[in-house]
Image: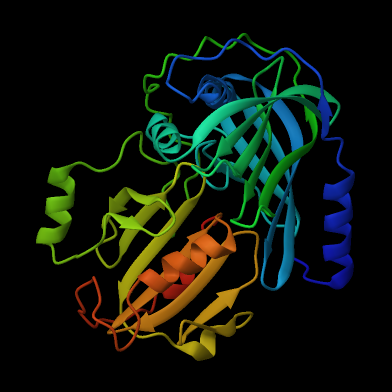
Amino acid sequence: MSRSSLGVLVAAVVLLSLAVSARAGTVPPPDQEGDDTGLHLLREAAAAARLQDYTGTRFVTSWGISGASSTLFDVRHTAAGGLFVDDVSPREPGRWVDPGSLAGGMASPPEGMLRTLAGNYRVVPAGGGVVCGRDSLIVEALRPDGTRAARFWIDELSRLLLRREILDGAGRVAYADTFLDLTLPDPRPVPPATGSAPAEPPRVPSPSPSPSPPQSLPQSPPGPEELDRLRARGWEFSGSLPGRLRLFSASDAARDYLYLGYSDGLSVVSVFIQPGDLDETRLRGWHAQSLDGHTIWIRDSVEREAIWASGGHVYTVLADAPADMVDAAIAALPHEGEPGLWLRMGKGAARLLSWINPFE
């Protein structure tokens, strides 16, 4: 993706000029889940992302220490065939993804993630707005102190998620994913939200052959038996990270690395641990950064990416979370010279750079 000043300026101007406006409107009756009176709308949006047929263009921007990074996607979805995402900027081969994955814009998060969201935040309706010319319902996720952690714009007619914003602790938009245009040839009615987990999503065509985060998040966190199995294989890991992040997925199916997925219900922080040493000469396009006295390597992209070596392991972090949350999570993971949470095994890492991009 282009990191030129012009590209960043255009990205900022486009986002600021999007037709996302406040609108007086009637919000559907609240659900009965305590204070989370907007949760049923997010459940309906998750269902609509798999039910509706649509085409459109998505614009994704994240803001970090180095400024803004943006990308543009053409998307096409059918209930029968799944979601196809084609990178417009930068131009890359299109791919099939799951609507419940990071590449799918987290348009259809699993029920377990929505329950995590409700446990960490208060989810409430916040009036109406307009996104790409379509009337929408706004839902906000509020922290315990009442500050906004996220905003969602949900299409009134189809219940599709039109825009998602994640805010950092200072109230600044750290991540935004929005439709610039959307075509719905024949919107289907979305069943009322029930709060029960939907059927397991179908496998998407042409899955990536290289290691990466799962095509879709699991419907619920791993159970005690699975965690015990991983620990019996020598892995040691924490069930949580700073920022209300809870372990949501854990797998060593590839045998030579461990994948851990953490979520607060809004963002996903993926952690990969692979035995070996980091060859820093191969990190073209990355830059060194000091974090709490430790050197990590950062690459500017829409997803926050960091990589470092410690105690015979290479750690890679990929996230769509705000920079302050990601920095806190990275600081909590093992670093050289500190007692770590994970077993040091010291094997090669020749495949490391083949799986650092979750969109591949």
Residue depicted at x 65% and y 48%: 94
Residue depicted at x 35% and y 71%: 333
Quarter the C terminus occupies: bottom right
For residue 243, which quarter of the picture?
bottom left
| Residue 71: x %, y % from top left | 73, 55
Vertical order, 128 against 306 (above or below): above
Quarter the N terminus occupies: bottom right
Is 57 displayed left or right of 6 in the figure? Answer: left
Q: Is residue 80 visible?
A: no
Residue depicted at x 57% and y 76%: 298
Residue depicted at x 59% and y 59%: 303
| Residue 323: x %, y % from top left | 58, 64
Q: Is residue 321 visible?
A: yes
Vertical order, 298 against 48 (above or below): below
User: Which residue is outermost to the front?
Assistant: 145
| Residue 329: x %, y % from top left | 43, 65
User: Which residue is outermost to the left?
Assistant: 232
Is 106 displayed left or right of 285 in the figure? Answer: left
Vertical order, 143 against 23 (above or below): below
Is 85 displayed left or right of 117 in the figure? Answer: right
Is 320 displayed left or right of 226 in the figure? Answer: right
| Residue 179: x %, y % from top left | 75, 37
For residue 233, which quarter of the picture?
bottom left
